[in-house]
Image: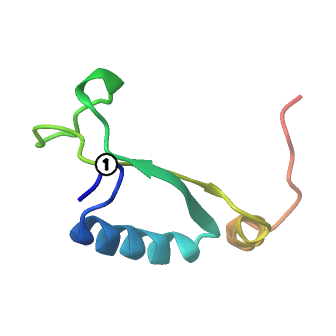
């Protein structure tokens, strides 16, 4: 594998994550394999962080999901 290329198993997992996020209206914005100098916290029970995935809003579908899942009634924002 060349530098920056994902392992085949990593691609499969990213596809699974992408499918799960799709239901919430989120998308994968970026993913990378951190190096020792990236100062990424080590997950509990792991020896290192293998892949970091940044997910976020990629369009209006997240807001539709948010609106449909919040409790009914007036939304009161703090001042």
Residue 17 screen position, x and y as percent: 41, 69
Callout 1: few (<14), some (14-19), or many (20+) C-alpha neighbours within 10 Å?
Answer: few
Question: Which quarter shows the C terminus?
Answer: top right
What is the basis of the colouring in this image?
rainbow
**In the rendered picture of this protein, how many numbered marks are placed on residues?**
1
Of the pair 17 and 74, the residue shown nearer to us: 17
Q: Give percent across and percent down for residue 51.
A: 31, 49
Determine whether, in the image, residue 60 is placed left or right of residue 79: left
Judging depth in this view, the residue of 42 and 3 nearest the camera is: 3
Q: Quadrant of the N terminus?
A: bottom left
The quarter holding residue 69 reads bottom right
- Name the spot of residue 53 as percent of width and height, x first: 43, 51
Which residue: 59% across, 70% down? 24
Q: Say which residue appears at 23% left-offset and 46% top-offset.
A: 50
Residue placed under numbered mark 1 in the picture: 3
- 44 relative to 70, above or below: above
Rendered residue at 46%/74% (across/down)? 20
| Along the viewing direction, whichever of 76 and 49 lies nearer the viewer | 49
**In the displayed structure image, the side of residue 54 where residue 49 appears, left or right:** left
Q: Is residue 53 visible?
A: no
Vertical order, 19 against 25 (above or below):
below
Residue projecting furthest to the front: 2
* Residue 13 visible at all: yes
Find residue 56 and report its image quarter: bottom right
User: Residue 70 location, x and y as percent?
Assistant: 71, 64
State left or right for residue 21 relative to residue 69: left
In the rendered view, does 43 fall on the left or right side of 16?
A: left
Helix, strand or loop under label 1 = loop
């Amino acid at each position: 594998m060349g530098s920056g290329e994902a392992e085949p198993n990593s691609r499969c997992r990213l596809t699974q994550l992408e499918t799960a996020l799709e239901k919430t209206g989120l998308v994968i914005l970026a993913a990378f394999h951190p190096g020792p100098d990236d100062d990424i916290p080590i997950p509990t029970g792991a020896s290192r962080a293998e892949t970091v995935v940044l997910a976020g809003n990629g369009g209006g579908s997240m807001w539709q999901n948010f609106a449909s899942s919040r409790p009914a009634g007036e939304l009161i924002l703090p001042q």
